[in-house]
Amino acid sequence: MAIEEKPFPLDVNEARGEVALWVDDVPLVLAAEMGRLSAVSTRLQCKSLNDLFLRLSDVEAAATVAGIELLTVKGKPLEAITKLKLKHFGDCRVAFLAVLAHHFDGEDPGNVEAADKAA
């Protein structure tokens, strides 16, 4: 018996780099806008973009909570955070990598290589 996926109820503008994420039954749309990335970086006291990238892609607890709260452009991030469990971290990692990858699309090869090495 196949598992039926529930339809995503929020509009996701993939051309803008938005990514859908479910945390339990809470739908979110994330986007890695520079102001939002800066807020995550400040909250986590990251020293570089590489540090920020690694912390989000490794889904450490503080980075995951900050990423959900500060990168969400649609949905209810605080509700999602209250329902967050370790089983959701894999999906969060995929979503964080997807929104960060949007910044490396079309960039010079050096940036792509740095992103690949950090992942």
Image (cartoon, rainbow, N blue to C red):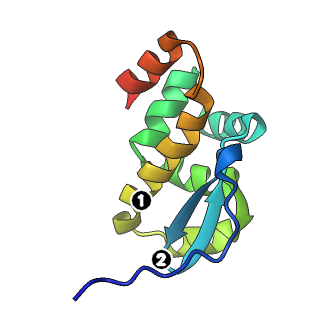
Q: Estimate how packed mark 2 is, as few (under 14), some (14 to 19) or many (20 or more) residues with alpha carbons within 10 Å.
A: some
Residue 17 locus on image (x, y percent): 65, 45
Residue 105 drawn above or below residue 97: above
Mark 1 and mark 2 lie on one chain; the one further toward the N terminus is 2
Residue 15 locus on image (x, y percent): 68, 46
Query: Which residue is at 51% across, 44% downward?
Result: 98
Q: Is residue 66 left or right of residue 95?
A: right
Q: Estimate how packed mark 1 is, as few (under 14), some (14 to 19) or many (20 or more) residues with alpha carbons within 10 Å.
A: some
- Position of the C terminus, as image quadrant, is top left
Query: Which residue is at 71% across, 45% downward?
Result: 16
Query: Which residue is at 59% across, 19% downward?
Result: 107
Q: Say whether residue 42 is visible.
A: yes
Mark drawn on residue 48: none
Q: Say whether residue 61 is visible.
A: no
Q: In the image as oriented, which residue stretches furthest toward the right? A: 35
Q: Is residue 78 left or right of residue 53?
A: right
Residue 60 drawn above or below residue 28: above
- Give the residue number, with chain letter if any, for mark 2: 24
- Please name the amino acid that badge 2 sits on: Asp
- Please name the amino acid that badge 1 sits on: Asp
Residue 51 locus on image (x, y percent): 50, 26
Q: Is residue 15 left or right of residue 19?
A: right
Residue 86 drawn above or below residue 5: above
Residue 86 locus on image (x, y percent): 36, 64
Residue 105 quadrant = top right
Q: Secondary structure at mark 2?
A: loop
Mark drawn on residue 91: 1
Q: Are marks 1 and 2 in contact (CB under 8 Å)?
A: no
Comparing 41 with 111, the one in front is 111
Query: Which residue is at 74% across, 34% downward?
Result: 34
